[in-house]
Amino acid sequence: MKKITKINELEAKGFYSLAVSDENNIYISGQLPTDQKTGELLLGSAEEETRLILNNIQDILKQYGCDKNHILKTTVFMSDPSYWEEVNKVYSEFFVDHQPARAAIPVKESPDLGFKIEIEAIASLKKLI
């Protein structure tokens, strides 16, 4: 099992890993819109947060020699279902023709952090067809 706990200033803030893998898959913990250079949470529109999170997920995948086309499934947590259109727009730009499975779950906004979007992912270590 390979664990990733930090990439630049993007790191797990508790007792967990950013990602772990077994012989087949990579399991990426829920990612918030965090600036990798400073480690700061960058709150913005749902579109901006989604783009930053997906780029951070891609950088985590690079640590395993993979890219976004290895993603099998994502789970998107949104603090308001009205963000769906913005999230979907960024998804289509990011994934282009690759369409991983996805679940979208509305959650109550975090009162202390204020983020709109959180995304977790499962990816294959093997190239997908």
Image (tube, helix red, strand yellow):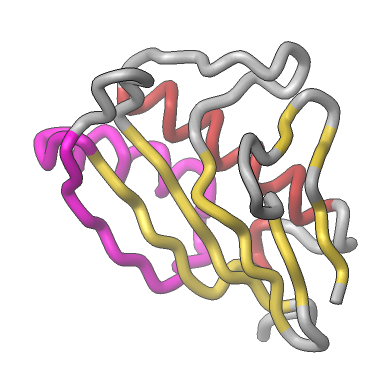
What residue is drawn where x is 68% and y is 50%? 18
Asked if residue 86 lies left or right of residue 39, the reply is left
The percent position of residue 64, horizontal first and vertical second, equals 86, 62
What residue is drawn where x is 73% and y is 23%? 36
Of the 4 image quadrants, the one containing the N terminus is bottom right
- Residue extent of the magenta highlight: 79-108
What residue is drawn where x is 74% and y is 58%? 67
The percent position of residue 45, horizontal first and vertical second, equals 32, 17
Where is 29 relative to 122, above or below?
above
Asked if residue 112 lies left or right of residue 61, the reply is left
The image quadrant that residue 19 belongs to is bottom right
Where is 37 relative to 103, above or below?
above
For the residue pair 75 and 20, the one nearer the viewer reads as 20
The image quadrant that residue 101 belongs to is bottom left
For the residue pair 54 and 120, the one nearer the viewer reads as 120
Residue at the left extreme, as displayed: 82
Of the 4 image quadrants, the one containing the C terminus is bottom right
What residue is drawn where x is 35% and y is 25%? 115
Asked if residue 35 lies left or right of residue 117, the reply is right
Q: Is residue 83 magenta?
A: yes
Asked if residue 26 lies left or right of residue 29, the reply is right
For the residue pair 32 and 90, the one nearer the viewer reads as 32
For the residue pair 118 and 102, the one nearer the viewer reads as 118
Where is 60 relative to 47, above or below?
below
The percent position of residue 100, horizontal first and vertical second, equals 47, 70
Report the number of discs.
Answer: 0
Q: Is residue 95 magenta?
A: yes
